[in-house]
Image: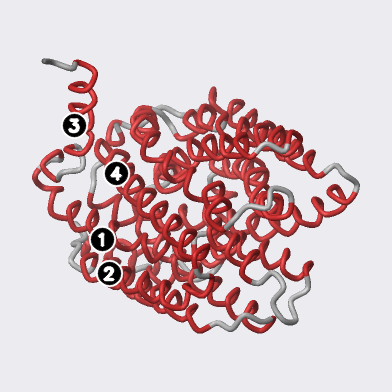
Amino acid sequence: MKFPIADYFFSALNNFVAGFHPRSLPPMLRANYARELFSWLLLPLMLGAIEGGTMAIIVKKMFEGAPGVHPAQLDFAVAAVSAAPNIANLASFLWAGLAHGRTKVPFISRLQLATCSCVAMIAVVPLSSGGLLALTILIFVARILWTGVITIRTAVWRNNYPRANRALIAGKMAMVQAVMLAITGLVIGEAMDIAPGSFRYLFPALALAGFAGNAIYRKVRLRGQRRLQRAEQEGRAAGAARVDPRRLFSLLREDRFYARFMWWMSVFGLGNLMMGPPQVIVLNDEFHTSYLEGILATTVIPLMVMPLAIPAWSRLLSRTHVIAFRSIHGWTFVLASAAMWIAVLMHSLPLMYFASVLLGLGFAGGALAWNLGHHDFAPAHRDSEYMSLHVTLNGIRGALAPFLAVAIYFPMARAGWGGWFFFLCFLINLVGLFGFMSMRRDIPPRKPAEI
């Protein structure tokens, strides 16, 4: 007896899984791809321990009522932890300068090892005011180190994978990372609900997984390493690259079109980054969620949606300029902020989870555009500079948005208007989206080498 629907489902599933096999790529790309893929099965287990949404829930619930921890201090710590990944981006220019003219894979490997060590040390943090400060510092250090990985990794991808395959490969890496981060969030949430002290052995175990992933990543080979290193050293000798943020910001004068794109990214990103800390506060104070319920909304649901959405986003990004991509992709965050606003007004946790689904759709496209979008602007030898400028500007708004959000949310909540904070985020996102749409007509034609 045949079951057409079941046959179709298993055939689609088989094709999806087979798409991750190295044989799905040209032979010259397979070895590096396989090493990177397996390393990103393990490294996200470590990274999931300090993922912003997960850690914000842990901080809020774990230190609530701890000796010497004032409620306002705790909420601003939640803002700091939520902001840590983006504030850490301010160090991007430093990593771009330090890695300039050096071998990329060993440099990335050392940063990964240092990040794993920070995650392991979280296990010894005491539950006190001093422990809250120590935990916040460890998270910031870990995220600063990981910013170096993100900033430099894009140069590895650009040299190892041609444009025709790059978005597809980046999408596969992002899918794997999203699934593993979601699994880590589920494990941490369930473990903390069962035994709040479980973080003392759970975080070292996750750090060990990161060390294993690093051992695999060290075997990646960068194609054209000597040629790239020579070009970067010649650029440094000519004064084209320095460990100097002023050099990065000069790009805004040199490339006015990129500067315009960065402006609208800043507007659009502000609305997105402001949503995180108030969402955590609302989930705990208004919805009274458990560890797992809170982490589902902030981390697990968005990350589980990402692998489903990334293939479609990667196909779109492969065919279009990143500006055109952002003008379509941006609607996901606009709708997510609107759904979150309505969820709080209606006190509906299911609707809050639906907002998380929309965020997952947005994060899926954002993960690709974040890593690859600057390639539509940057010449090859200045790739890290363009990326580090993008990351640094994100760090500036990431340093401001969460604290600004908490400062705005508190008086609104006290006045009974807390839900309308998310309407403000909706308006800011909408303005940023219209900015991307206004740039579409000015997109320059692609050069033959980029097609």
Instruction: Report the Cα–Cα distance between label 2 and label 4.
Output: 18 Å
Quarter assignment of residue 447: top left
The mark lying in front, picked from 2 and 3, is 3
Query: Mark 1 or mark 3, which is nearer the start of the sequence?
Result: 3
Q: CA distance from mark 2 to mark 3?
A: 29 Å
Residue 180 position within the rendered picture, expressed as x and y whole percent measured from the top left: 35, 54
> Which residue, given by chain and number where applicable, does mark 3 sit on?
15
Residue at image position (18%, 17%) is: 3
Give the crowd class for mark 3: few <14, some 14-19, many >=20 residues within 10 Å: few
The location of residue 100, given as percent across then percent down, is 37, 67
Residue, disc 4: 172
Q: Are marks 1 and 2 in contact (CB under 8 Å)?
A: yes
- Is residue 31 or residue 393 the one in the foreground? 31
SS at mark 2 in the image: helix
Residue 99 position in % (x across, y down): 38, 69
Occupied quadrant, residue 367: top left
**Quadrant placement of the C terminus:** top left
Residue topped by disc 1: 39
Residue identifier under label 2:
214
Q: Secondary structure at mark 4?
A: helix
Q: Nearer the viewer, residue 87 or 186?
A: 186
Q: Nearer the viewer, mark 3 or mark 1?
A: 3
Query: Which amino acid lies under the numbered mark 2 shown in the image of this protein?
Result: Asn
Q: Is residue 412 above or below residue 69?
A: above
Q: Residue at x 71, y 36 (%)?
A: 341
* Lower position in the chain sequence, tag 1 or tag 2: 1
CA separation, marks 3 and 1? 22 Å
